[in-house]
Image (spheres, grey):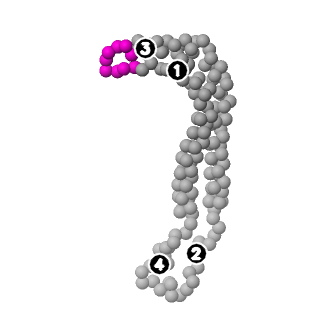
Amino acid sequence: MCKEKNSKPRSFMLQSLPVCLFVGWVLLMVLPPFALWMLRSSWLDDLDSPNVQAEWNEFRDDMKKQSDRSGPVQHKIPKSSEPPLRVWLRDYFWLAVAAWGVLGSALYGFFSIAVVGVTRAAGLPSAFPLSENKVGSDSHIDK
């Protein structure tokens, strides 16, 4: 029987890698949505100011003027009477958080698989160590 030369335990890094990756995923899923949630109310308050609405109305009027011109570029008039960021923060916030969770988890999952694959391949002994399987070697007869 072949006795494995590298019978030492795996390093601490290889043992704790899944835990570290899980903690990283939890932080990725919690911190950005939490920060956005905390900033959301102040941003909505800022976007409710008359200046922001006046700038948005001015922009829509400008697009209306530019859409009447004949030329190579036709500008479309925005349909919303409110600034897009206000609509997004008010109406689509939870959709954005769900998309963050799904897309972030998928990307992080593929990244984690790659990291685990690379670290495990580097930390485990080779299936065919070169020193024991040389052609013409009698090492397999002695064991």
Q: Are marks 2 and 1 in contact (CB under 8 Å)?
A: no
Q: Are marks 3 and 2 in contact (CB under 8 Å)?
A: no
In-front residue for pair 45/23 = 45
Write down the residue under mark 3: 64
Crowding at mark 4 (Cα within 10 Å: few <14, some 14-19, many 20+): few
In-front residue for pair 134/68 = 68
Write down the residue under mark 1: 80
Q: Are marks 3 and 1 in contact (CB under 8 Å)?
A: no
Q: Are marks 1 and 4 in contact (CB under 8 Å)?
A: no
Which amino acid does the dot numbered 4 rest on? Asn
Write down the residue under mark 2: 5
- Among numbered discs 3 and 1, the one appearing first in the sequence: 3
Which amino acid does the dot numbered 1 rest on? Ser
Crowding at mark 2 (Cα within 10 Å: few <14, some 14-19, many 20+): few
Q: What residue range appears in magenta?
A: 67-75
- Report if residue 97 lies within the magenta region: no
Which amino acid does the dot numbered 2 rest on? Lys
Crowding at mark 3 (Cα within 10 Å: few <14, some 14-19, many 20+): some
The circle on residue 133 is 4
- Among numbered discs 2 and 1, the one appearing first in the sequence: 2
Q: Secondary structure at mark 4?
A: loop
**Residue depth check, mark 3 versus mark 4: number of the one nearer the observer:** 3
**Residue depth check, mark 3 versus mark 2: number of the one nearer the observer:** 3
- Among numbered discs 3 and 2, the one appearing first in the sequence: 2
Residue at point 62% right, 26% down?
A: 90
